[in-house]
Image (spheres, rainbow, N blue to C red):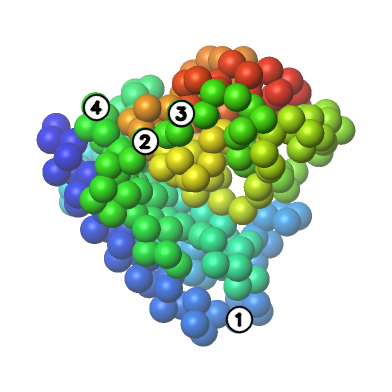
Amino acid sequence: MNLEAICKKAIEVALTAGKFIAAEKKKFKRSNIVEKGDRNLVSYVDLEAEKIIVNGLRPILPDADFITEEKTIVTGSESLRWIIDPLDGTTNFIHGVPVFCVSIALQQNNDLLIGVVYEINLDECFYAWRNGGAFLNGNKIAVTETNLLRNALTATGFPYEGFAEMDRYFLTLKSLFSNSRGVRRIGSAAIDLCYVACGRFDAFFEYNLNAWDVAGGALIVREAGGMVTDFSGGSNYIFGKEIIATNQKLYEAFKKEVTFPPS
């Protein structure tokens, strides 16, 4: 496969979906919200954007399967598959907070091949293909060289379920508040990962995430020279519901801060 060519086509699909989301933002009403679960929201915008993405990606690799957040297409068993979040940051979108994105990844077996994350409000497209480097709007990006936690700006996300581990989670945050330059929570794991990749954040962690939240951004971090693991230092961060992303110099110190296991 020509991964660079496939990535460029996936970028076109992400931009098309992003254009639709941006247009709907101007007329969206909260009465259009559907609750999938407590604090887990979806709207017609998520559903329609997902259909746009699936229909755009299908001709690129006709044999590829799909894992999609909103399950507008029910597949996910093949070794070659697209992993899609049509609108990461739905709660931000619904409340008019301008931080949300489209995330697309291509995975073969356990290997990530392509990652595309399009942040709609700033018109920033992050992308990478395996062994090709990471880019933002055509410019190559890299993680920071920060090697001390006290100089690091860190990021996290708050789960909307699985609160049994929150006490230990807050202990981790307390330590980071004291020992780092600060902690940010912007409401989109895909964007958090891309901000690590381009050096805006030095490190990110979160638990209770799904594959579509992290697959695209994880490859972009790796291709930008960063480290991506689960909390134990392993590779089960796509489907394991936990992720750490940092530069290589900061990784060990930051990993020690993320001491709580998922429930």
**Which residue in the structure is indicated by mark 3?**
145
Residue situated furthest right in the rendering: 167
Callout 4: 10 Å neighbours few (<14), some, many (20+)?
Answer: few
Mark 1 against mark 2, which lies toward the viewer? Answer: 2
Which mark is first along the chain, 3 or 1? 1
**Which residue in the structure is indicated by mark 2?**
142
Secondary element at tag 2:
loop
As rendered, which of 210 and 44 lies closer to the eye? Answer: 210
Secondary element at tag 3:
loop
Residue at x 31% of width, y 62% of height: 15
Q: CA distance from mark 4 to mark 3?
A: 20 Å
Q: CA distance from mark 1 to mark 3?
A: 43 Å
Secondary element at tag 1:
loop
* Amino acid type at mark 2: Ala
Mark 4 against mark 3, which lies toward the viewer? Answer: 3
Query: Which numbered dot is residue 131?
Result: 4
* Amino acid type at mark 4: Asn
Q: Position of residue 78 (x, y in %)?
A: 33, 31
As rendered, which of 173 and 235 lies closer to the eye? Answer: 173
**Which residue in the structure is indicated by mark 1?**
29
